[in-house]
Image (cartoon, helix red, strand yellow):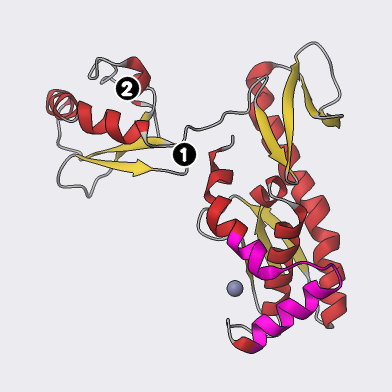
Amino acid sequence: MPLLTDSSLAGALDDANLAARIVVERNPRARRIGLRVDPAKGRIVLVRPPRASDRTVAAFLTSRARWIAKHLESLPPHIPFADGTVIPYRGSDYVLQLRPHERGGVWRENDAIIVTGRPEHAPRRVRDWLKQEALRVLTPATQTLATQLGVNVTRVSVRDTRSCWGSCSPDGKLSFSWRLILAPDDVLTYVAAHEVAHLKHMNHSARFWDVVEELLQTAEIDWVLARQWLRRSGAALHRYG
Ligand SMILES: [Zn+2]
């Protein structure tokens, strides 16, 4: 979705800081102009029907300027992968350090994550690296849990899912949100155990939760606390990148 500031409506709002946090969604089925808050990304979506003229949309935005300001103020901001940004990795804070004149990719060094190469590619590089790390940590964690339970995991993959942290298919394919690598290890392991347990019980029955608890006992992880963490802090992980 293009930013409002990149469209012909760039000047519709007096405040450029507000305008920079609005994206335009052209919706062929929309009947009227609308605004929607996207809390995960810390922005507002302007829904634009096909027949609305620039003038009509601009007038609409001007009339809603106070509403926009009020809602954006109450939203936690989006945190870009840029030089100096602090991001969580396995539950601890790291500073992103861009080194445009060096080569070698992305790596961890003390409490920094070093990103080499051209700065405009840094966001994608960081994202790719985090996905790779998520897979590197989740794959053995999942396999260990599966062995423990005596079930077969045929594939582990990561995606950027908004609505769920993990999913599984009956034939043993497990998929996770790569953003779990930002969460503490206990939380990541809990989600892995949750999906592995579904290979035994495809529901959330009491017996299912017994399996989750049993799987996590060896690692001394309290699934109630892990689930609570996700409910409270999980949405914030979507603010990064
Ligand atoms: Zn489930």
Which range of residues does the magenta coloring cover? 207-228
Amino acid of disc 2: Ser
Secondary structure type for disc 1: loop
In percent of the image, x 34 and y 16: which residue is there? 16
Q: State yes or no: residue 163 in magenta.
A: no
Displayed quadrant of residue 64: top left
Name above or below for residue 168 compared with residue 210.
above
Between disc 1 and disc 2, the foreground one is 1
Instruction: Classify mark 2: residues with Cα within 10 Å, few (<14), some (14-19) or many (20+).
Output: few
Q: Main secondary structure of the magenta part?
A: helix
Quadrant position of residue 187: bottom right
Query: Is residue 216 within the magenta segment?
Result: yes
Residue highlighted by disc 2: 7
- Vertical order, 64 against 130 (above or below): above
Question: Looking at numbered disc 1 in the image, what kind of residue is underneath it?
Answer: Lys
Q: Residue at x 66, y 89 (%)?
A: 207
Residue 108 lies, in percent from the top left, at: 84, 32
Residue 172 appears in the rendering: no
Task: Locate the C terminus and report the quarter of the image it occupies.
Answer: top right
Does label 2 point to a residue whose CB lies under 8 Å from ligand 1?
A: no
Q: Position of residue 90 (x, y in %)?
A: 75, 46
Q: Say which of 140 and 6 sits in front.
A: 140
